[in-house]
Amino acid sequence: MQKKQLIVLVALCIGFVTMSYGQMNRYQIKNGFGIYGGITQYDILTDNFITKKGNGWQAGASATVDIPHKWYNVSYIIQLSENNVGIAAKPLLVSPMDEFVDYKIFTAQIALLLHVKIIQSFLTVDVGPMIQYNSDMEIKDKAYENYIVNSYTNLMAKDLRDISNFNVDGAIGASAGFGFFKLKAQYIYGFTNMLAKLNDSNLDLTGNDKKIKGNQSMLALTAMITF
């Protein structure tokens, strides 16, 4: 009796190993690593200030799980970027013309992306959540620090420095390419109010006292090499 049970157990084990090996050969999951870089166009969507989009750069790394038998792949990414945005201001309150004060913002983002296969892995739609750390806004030219921000009476350009440093974003885009090379387009929208911290800074908001609110808007065009 024990001998029969042993034979059945061995047969089941052989069958399980054979079936697992067959599935592994049929559905070979591949892990890949990629590095990429490119340009960005950055803006802050807000009703409080008049802004101007600015250009910057982005670089990042991606760890991808390629799942042949599914309609999607998954990747984990980390990316760094230096972005620029302009905010309208004037040297004196009575000045007739506005100028754009340029600010620099550094961002570091971590994301989990789902890559929906349109043409296998050659063309995908990429979507997923993103956690972001960003620096404060830094005026690129110190000569503009005391400019008066448009729509305000006493708010100076240098007062806009301390913004919220941790934000939650959403990303959507597309990737296209063959073999080890891909081109990527990605749009990143900030779900959280990245200017919320300004409301707690006791700023002089004379002239426009409504709550300050702004959401990040970033477009990135990059090229990626995979290994």
Image (cartoon, rainbow, N blue to C red):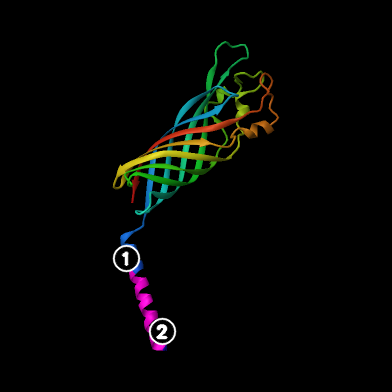
Q: Residues within 10 Å of mark 1 (few under 14, many from 20)?
A: few
Amino acid identity at mark 1: Gly
Residue, disc 2? 5
User: Quadrant of residue 1 in the image?
Assistant: bottom left
Check residue 83 for magenta coloring: no
Which residue is located at x 36 percent, y 67 percent? 20
Which residue is located at x 51 percent, y 28 percent? 85
> Which numbered disc, 2 or 1, marks the residue closer to the eye?
2
| Residue 22: assigned label | 1
Amino acid identity at mark 2: Gln
Which residue is located at x 69 percent, y 24 percent? 204
Residues drawn in magenta: 2-18
Q: Mainly helix, strand or loop, the magenta region? A: helix
User: How many numbered tags mark residues here?
Assistant: 2
Is 158 displayed left or right of 206 in the figure? left
Query: How far is mark 2 from mark 1, CA to CA?
Result: 25 Å
Provide the secondary structure element on which disc 1 rests.
Answer: helix
Check residue 15 for magenta coloring: yes
Which residue is located at x 31 percent, y 60 percent? 26
Residue 17: where, in percent of width, then height?
36, 71
Q: Residues within 10 Å of mark 2 (few under 14, many from 20)?
A: few
Residue 201: where, in percent of width, then height?
68, 32
Is 104 displayed left or right of 197 in the figure? left
